[in-house]
Image: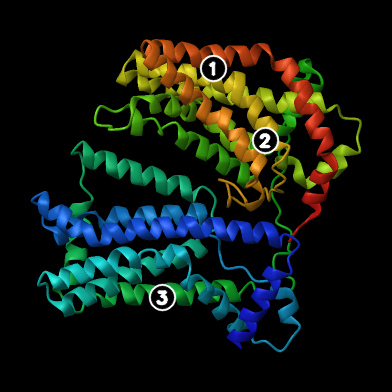
Amino acid sequence: MFAKFIYLEWKSFTRSASFASNLALKILMGFLVLYFTLVFLALGVGAFYILKEMKLDPLVTINKFLIYYFVMDLIIRLLLQAIPVMNIRPLLTLPFKRPTIVHFSLGKTVLSFFNVVHAFFFLPFCAVLIYEGYEAISVLFWLIGLYSLVYANNFLNILLNNKDNLLGIFITVALILAGCQYYKLFDITLYTYPFFEALFHTKWVFAIPVLVLAGLYYWTYNYLKGDLYLDAGLTVKNDIAKTEQLTWLNQFGTLGTFLKNDIKLIKRNKRSKTTVGLSIMFLFYGLIFFNSNSHQPVVMQIFAGIFVSGGFLITFGQFVPSWDSAYYQLMMTQNIPYRGYLNSKWWLMIIGTIVSTILASFYLFFGWHVYLTIVVGAIYNIGVNSLMVLLGGAFTKTPIDLSSGKGAFGDKKAFNVKTMLITIPQLILPVGLYWLGIHLMNVNLGLALVALFGLLGLALKNKAFVFIEKIYKKEKYATIAAYKQKS
């Protein structure tokens, strides 16, 4: 029976109208999988000897920080891993047993990259432990316990998929715990380390995560089986209606009307809320580059400044006009000027950039020059990147499911040559200008060159909008056709 399901999945993939883009995405993802596989493999083999050279006990050190490893794994799954999906409606009218369908759907996740990749770290590390004289049975029980927790995260991701705001909660908790440990206020590892140590030293403890995994599988199985009906999900959920007039925007005419729609869209939908949450995460991106212990090249500081100030611009702007894909066809039948529509999106991104720059004022802790780099990045975002993002949106024909928080980083149709070329002035040009200024004089000249290009872009905004508007009109019918495509 499972062989039949695999055959149907293959036919669904090869007969899809988007087969070419799916195949290209699979090839691209294959390279990414290979890269991360090699990284995990190198860490698995080298971690033991690297920790030995640092005068640390490898097994004790790994056990101490495994709590963060599994918390980050769950966060990444909630953000990126798709839940098992099958087109079950045709199957329910055929002689397929519902338990078989559910078991196959869950079985698809077993071979997910998010599960398999951990083997490239744990298996080599365990092999090195045995080679270095650790008891083989203890290593085996330790491995079984840890991999049971990996798959426990896999099924937790399915159970928690439709729970709003959990991703933000998990990230906040992880940051608070890491911060408390860094500043020696509270060390969570003192309470979790004994359990991971017991997985190695006490023979029966590995049964605890195995039983937890079995319980989660049974729970997930019943959870999916309970919704396996033709009319599942058709029940209308009754919510309390809230009206928001936002009358203060009426003074801006057509621009105000579009802004009201965008503000309501952001406040009311899961996908847009997830995007705002991701833009907040971008605020902390600069900590990688601006702290005193960073070994990043100085030229990459402007790269960080652009990301810190432009988090909302990047995450929201890359999907213009896809945010309106559900009703884009209707909107195109109305007497709506493209200039007014694009101008409202531009102003929304500008407001988001200004707010992000103000919120990033905590970087003043690292000095005025660091915050000046962020301000310069904001100027470049406002003058150049806002226009580049709008231009890229004309070629990114990705319909968005506003009720889902998945895929907030992108989608398969976002990958094309034109959008990749547009990223050159977005990211590579400011880094090149900053590098040129440093080599001609100093970092101040580098900042001045980046800011100058931002101001130049702002001065040429109207001319740029004329060109962008023509592109959108040219791509209008191709965009409508793409939004009609559901497969």
Residue on which disc 1 sits? 379
Residue 283 image position (x, y, % from top left): 44, 31
Q: Circle 3: is it few (<14), some (14-19), or many (20+) Cα within 10 Å?
A: few
Q: What amino acid is labelled 3 in the image? A: Gly
Residue 332 image position (x, y, % from top left): 87, 38
Helix, strand or loop for disc 2: helix
Residue on which disc 2 sits? 392
Residue 93: which quarter of the image? bottom right
Give the alpha-carbon distance from disc 1 to disc 2, as whole Å. Answer: 19 Å
Q: Nearer the viewer, mark 1 or mark 2?
A: 2
Residue 319: which quarter of the image? top right
Please state which of residues 340 and 23 is positioned toward the viewer in this rendering: 23
Above or below, comparing residue 207 to residue 293 in the picture: below
Q: Nearer the viewer, mark 3 or mark 2?
A: 2
Residue on which disc 3 sits? 215
Q: Residue at x 82, y 50 (%)?
A: 481
Residue 146 image position (x, y, % from top left): 29, 68
Q: What amino acid is labelled 2 in the image? A: Gly
Q: Residue at x 16, y 73 (%)?
A: 130
Helix, strand or loop for disc 3: helix
Please state which of residues 396 and 180 is positioned toward the viewer in this rendering: 396
Q: Quadrant of the C terminus?
A: bottom right
